[in-house]
Image (cartoon, rainbow, N blue to C red):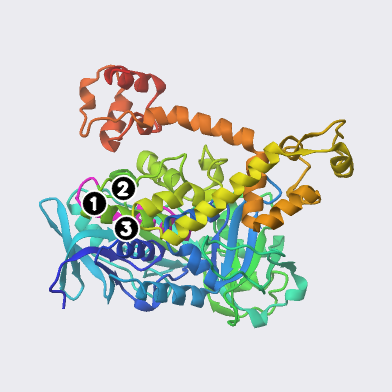
Amino acid sequence: MFGEEYDIIVVGGGHAGAEAAAAASNMGSKTLLVTMNLQTIGQMSCNPAMGGIAKGQIVREIDALGGYSGIITDKSAIQFKMLNKSKGPAMWSPRAQSDRMRFAEEWRMALENTPNCDFYQEMVSGLIIENDKVVGVKTSLGIEIRSKAVVLTNGTFLNGLIHIGEKQFGGGRAGEKAATGITEELTKIGFESGRMKTGTPPRVDGRSLDYSKMIVQPGDAKPEKFSYLETPVLTEQRDCHMTHTSKLVHDLLREGFDRSPMFNGRIKSIGPRYCPSIEDKINRFADKDRHQMFVEPEGWSTVEVYVNGFSTSLPEDVQYKALKSVVGFENVKFFRPGYAIEYDYFPPTQLKHTLETKLVDNLYFAGQINGTTGYEEAASQGLMAGINASLKLQEKDPFILTRDEAYIGVLIDDLITKGTEEPYRMFTSRAEYRTLLRQDNADLRLTPKGYEIGLASEERLRRMEKKKENSDSFVDFFKKTSVLPDDINPILERVNSATVKQSDKMFKVFSRPKVTMEHMLELESVSSFVTDNSFDREVLEQTEIQVKYSGYIAKEKNNADKLSRLENIKIPENFDYSKLKSLSYEAREKLKAIQPVTISQASRISGVSPSDISVLLVYMGR
């Protein structure tokens, strides 16, 4: 069946595996995607949504590089929202509700239409490793499939254990079996593994809910989209709804705490701190009488509903009794109860920045196997693993994004340098250069890089260049054009901003906090310039940000440039830190374990002090 050798085998068909297979195939690698169930490629195991705070920026970055997640989301979206619009543009985060079934179908179709991508349905139970290099995989049927590289994207399936109250059973997801064999094989050859936990809420029948008692959560009046390509924009949307738990609901849930696997010791692993279960929220925030719950439709046509904010592993009878006491849920019917799942992961400090393992050549890890949580975080790692596996086989330089280039760069650097003992989730606060890493400029930052490595198409590059050219010319227009007091003062008076006594450059007036693009478009010279050049909303938004935040952007760019000098000071491979006696004991141990590539990376390792960095700089002749 598999007489020929593949370039790359991707194990797992979730978000990480799908992006890895797409990237590798599109870069010319003969790729095989092996998954336990071909019907669940791109399956949304938890909530039917993509994006959100910082996560939306990641989806835009994936798209800018030539990945598929943004395109798939646009094709299957049922609602779109730009979050944090009341804050500065560094915080704006796109989020879309998706039709769960269409999302998976679109992924399957996209991959089937990708040249160089083959499929096989079976469980991978082991790896073929020769001379510290992976050369293929072994399946549960005993079939050996040879390849030059392997990307593991096993999600929650490695020795997955599902908990519902006092009941527990093996599984990687509801209704699907766990994957076995890989963890045992990897730990035998020296890999360190651990256990993590995540959970999911009950799914319920929307026909049994009373939406009139809930608060409507509509999408944006003018919805945007994720992809920078010509993907569909929503013309109609489905509403979400919001309701709340209550003291009664909390009391009913507490009745089952003695049977909760979280509190009776059955679950020993750590769950996501920023997406806690309802029992964890009640326990940690005992002073709060209620918590928000978002009622999210699973698609255009289905009646299935996702109860966001009610993640739980309590016994099913406790879940049902408590949920019936939530406003609007009095007659609720369950499709399935919520559950928690424990699974194996491998601390990511065992990886290089390319996501290749340090122990075994040409073996890459991506997604929840690295201790992350979230579709977007997984997809971005899959993309980077697929890219780097392909580049290595082509004997080209690795593709590594720095912390000032992309949220993806922050994510991978955090994992490799700091590791994680709890499911890692991306936030804007994790990125020290978030003013540079906005969702609106992901194409400007990354499409040229994606094109250079052979992933982003020429169409993407041309669209990006046109957008840059248009926004640059518009910014230049504001810098060169003056406005008369008689024209601008009525607008300034209306927004309670100080009037001007003489003509001034538009750039200066536009820079004021209360003056928006809409106000500037009231000026005939500005509206004519926009009309004559056929500028779209994207160009207007990009121009406004460049004008209003030019000072902040320049300052942050300057800070990034200063730190990038440390990024250019390389540390020799397999450097012997034991000979530097001036280093602290902790620094020597951490540096030896993580083997940072640059002084900059070394400076971010927990336990390595500024004085330790000074020692390294002196040794490097700096």
Q: CA distance from mark 1 to mark 2?
A: 10 Å
Residue labelled with disc 2: 354
Q: Disc 1 marks which amino acid? A: Lys
Q: Is residue 612 visible?
A: yes
Marks 1, 2: nearer the viewer: 1
Counting residues from the start of the chain, the first of labels 1 and 3 encountered is 3
Residue 411 numbered mark, or none: none
Membership of 377 in magenta stretch: yes
**SS at mark 3 in the image:** helix
Q: Position of residue 451 (x, y in %)?
A: 39, 54
Q: Position of residue 233 (x, y in %)?
A: 61, 69
Counting residues from the start of the chain, the first of labels 3 and 2 encountered is 2
Q: Is residue 371 visible?
A: no
Residue labelled with disc 3: 386
| Residue numbers of the magenta segment | 358-379
User: Which residue ends up furthest to the front in the rendered image?
Assistant: 532
Residue drawn where x is 62% and y is 53% of the image: 539
In the displayed structure, would residue 36 be above or below residue 68? Answer: below
Choose top left, top right, bottom left or bottom right for residue 302.
bottom right
Residue 392 numbered mark, or none: 1
